[in-house]
Image (cartoon, coloured by chain):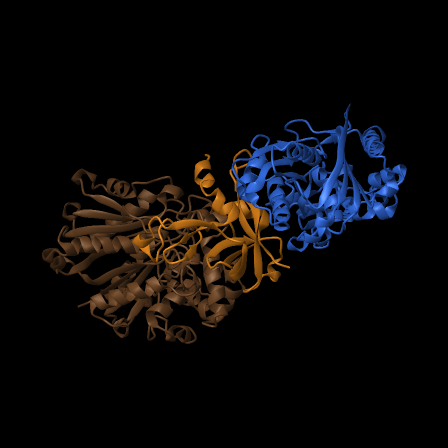
Amino acid sequence: MRDVYILGVGTTKFGELWDLSLRELASEAGLKAIMDAGIYAEDVDALYGANTSGGQFVDQEQIAALIADYSGITELNIPSIRIEAGSASGGAALMQAYLAVKSGQYSTVVVGGVEKMTDVPSEVATEIIGGSLDAEWETFFGATECSIAAMIARRHEFEGKAKRENYAMLPVISHKHASMNDTSHFKNVIKIEDVINASPVAEPLTVFDNAPISDGASALVISADLKKINNASHPIKIKSSSAANDFLSLHDRKSVDSFRAVKKSSDSALSLAGLDIGKIDALEIHDSYSIAALIQLEEILGKDAVKMTEGNDFYFNSSKPLNVSGGLKAHGNPLGTSGLYQAVEATVQLRGKAGQRQVKDPRNFLIHNMGGLGTTSVSTVIGVD
Amino acid sequence: MSSIVSYGSYIPRFRIRTEEIAKEWGENPENIKSGLFIHSKSVPGPDEDVLTISAEAAKNALRRTDLDKSKIGAIYVGSESHPYAVKPTSSILVEALGLTYDIHSADYEFACKAGTAAMQNVMAMVDSGQIENGMAIGADTSQGAPGDALEYSASAGGTAILIGKNGFADFNATLSFTTDTPDFWRREGEKYPSHGGRFTGEPAYFKHVLTGAKKMMDKMGTKPEDYDYAIFHQPNGKFPTRAAKMLGFNDEQVKDGLLTPYIGNTYSSSMIIGLSAVLDKAESGDRILGVAFGSGAGSDVFDMTVNDRVKSLKRERAKGVMEQVNNPIWIDYATYVKYRGKIIMRGA
Amino acid sequence: MSEVPRFWRESRHRYRLVGTRCTNCDTLYFPPRVICPTCRRESVGKMKEEEMSGAGEIYSFTVVHDGLEQFKMQIPYVMALVKMKEGPFLTAQIVDCSPEEVKIGTKVTATLRKVRSEGKAGIIQYGYKFTICP
């Protein structure tokens, strides 16, 4: 089967972007990706748009059609399809785009993610984010997504798997990296005590255990067209992409403090890429909640993960760089965009263009995007040959 | 004649003390406590209403008997604070309790005696053979206007009485006395009730309670000393104590059924929550007089005798009245007005 | 906008904890399911409704400070994963207690409460919550 490359990437700044609408965000990211790839609209065979809850945040469905329209490519009748998998929409869209190109159906595809979350008050955003839970049997009864994460944390701690400090460390790492990234939602550096002592959202989790409500869009151009790959300034290979799912609700799972879908998708992605975890130079994981990030690390890296939070292993200049972008926690979490921004960061890093936060000579990134809390899991390996 | 097969009550755990209310309105709590004889009252939680209270009371009644639920042929709920003006509480209860859909049901209203009016109807249906068993419930989450004397008393609670043949307490007789007496009312759409002040006393409460009780004793040829327990409608602690005294009952006969001083006036459950407390301890042979009063006005009177089947009653399967009375969560006035919807919320 | 049918359809499950038992593998499920996730096609037509007792214990919990608008009156409120005596786990609110009383392993019992309402004029949605056993 043919190889698929990322030819170009583009992203908006993440944050509370009061001046920009959903359509403006999407076209900005898309245009940047196309220009970065050195291609034109005529070269695009299809558009995949990732978006989690546009219908609720801005009353807009058919988001992919809107993106294509306002990106000025509708005259070309390019097929434009939205992919939704909760907050794993970005990762899922990247996987579908990758498969479409890999299969030979399309040669060059734009895959973009966008979420405009700040047009509604934060209480309403909390309700909408809860849409990734079971509406009838979790949200109806008062559960928020953070409350589910908190119950995972409580049980995880009760089982003796980790201490509060182990998962409180992960936002600290993300903030450190975000402080070196121009497009970050947050640029402040924080300490473990700040995380533990911040205002509680759902005990034991505080505001600093939660990724923020952000606006933002990111896009990639991917292609298997050898001519375009050769023309591109710095193509990066998508080595594999794999997904797995678990029960929608935490209360239906065999274990509430592990994410078996994460293990399944990451193992599968590594195996398809012909790599073992030791060959992965850096990780971008879905740190929507600190505890969720810790459990992902346990699934991907194994039991050493908890111990590793006690040292410096996860910083950009150390042995296992983690969320060098700043992660969802500090770079921002525009739901459906998150998985695509992870791929943008991996690409920029693999090109050696990440500036201050540049990982030293990386060859392979594993990115993990998640819908809900361990429900949908998409792992993608991006690297250089 | 029909009899009580089982019974159960539910009292919300939240309580507010007379002092908490009095201090907001510049009143001396000692005057209220001695004048109305109310120390505290129950407050429904923000997620409780007449339906949820009725359901819990009814579940307690069902726990105490092994009766097959499908043998319950009627359910009537008396209240002046049904959650819906139109949409019966009783129909929601049919589903909530898992009763048969082949059932008579309706909601009743007659101020504080709607629950006992429901009992009389169920008794008649059992006696006539229309149904084998029926459930009558009296429950309320009544409101007093802020600053009104009623704010000290209007509380929340419910009692379910399961009536059928071969129960543990026989109804010897029941009667009612009704006149057009406007002592207390609430107009359609109004949040708080109005009342006639001192007019609620002599021409309303005392006239109907005393007349009803006397008519019953005349009919049955009984005297106060023939009863082991007497329970009167209790809008406050003072009225029932005085009525009992005027009729010739002593404190021993009255004290077990007098709950308003601790939980306030539960309106449609008022007399029957007292009855429920008495049934928690009554023994075979005990004779009970119950007099309910509803403003507007009327009284429903019941003469009952506990029989030997009380020994096989599974009282311990549900929480008794005093156990619930003695399990409070105390709240302050601010929490009380928040829970009772007395503050203006956005979008409300 | 009223969503009456969507909530009405679940009444018996939410009022009385009626789940479904797969009679093929004898496992009880709550929330109710049409297909047993273990037996799959073998379970078709063999899922039977069954009411739970309401007894359970807390498996995990949290105290919610930043909660849903409909629950504002009760903030901070306790949400829990409850392991029911009959086996299933469910997600529910623990009421009539202070958060300090709630522990992993605490025995709880179901109570019927108002969960949500469609404003002051709309339908009231009732369902299970739990209280701590004395």
Quarter of the view holding residue A225: bottom left
Classify C123 as above or below B62. above
Q: How many marks?
A: 0
* Residue B67 point in image, percent of width and height: 60, 46
Decide which of B264, A32 is in the foreground and name it.
B264
Chain C drawn colour: orange
Eyeballing the image, is A172 above or below C120?
Answer: below
Residue A254 quadrant: bottom left
Looking at the image, residue A129 sits to the left or right of residue A112; the answer is right
Left or right: A250 in relation to B172: left
Residue A352 visible? The answer is: no
Q: Which chain is brown?
A: A
Q: Residue at x 68, y 44 (%)?
A: B167
Q: Position of residue A307 (x, y in %)?
A: 41, 76
Is there any visible trace of residue B137 in the rendered image? Answer: yes
Q: Image quarter for residue A272? A: bottom left
* Between B165 and B27, the one nearer to me in the picture: B165
Residue B197 on image: x %, y %: 81, 31
Which residue in the rendered view is the most extreme toward the left? Answer: A227
Q: Quadrant of the N terminus of chain B?
A: top right
The percent position of residue A362, horizontal first and vertical second, equals 25, 70
Position of the C terminus of chain B, as image quadrant, is: top right
Position of B80 with respect to C14 (left or right) is right
Relative vertical location of residue B43 with respect to residue A211 in this rendering, above or below? above
**Vertical side of C23 occupied by B147: above or below:** above
Residue at (89%, 37%) from the top-left corner?
A: B246
Identify the residue at image location x=63%, y=36%: B77
Image colour assigned to chain B = blue
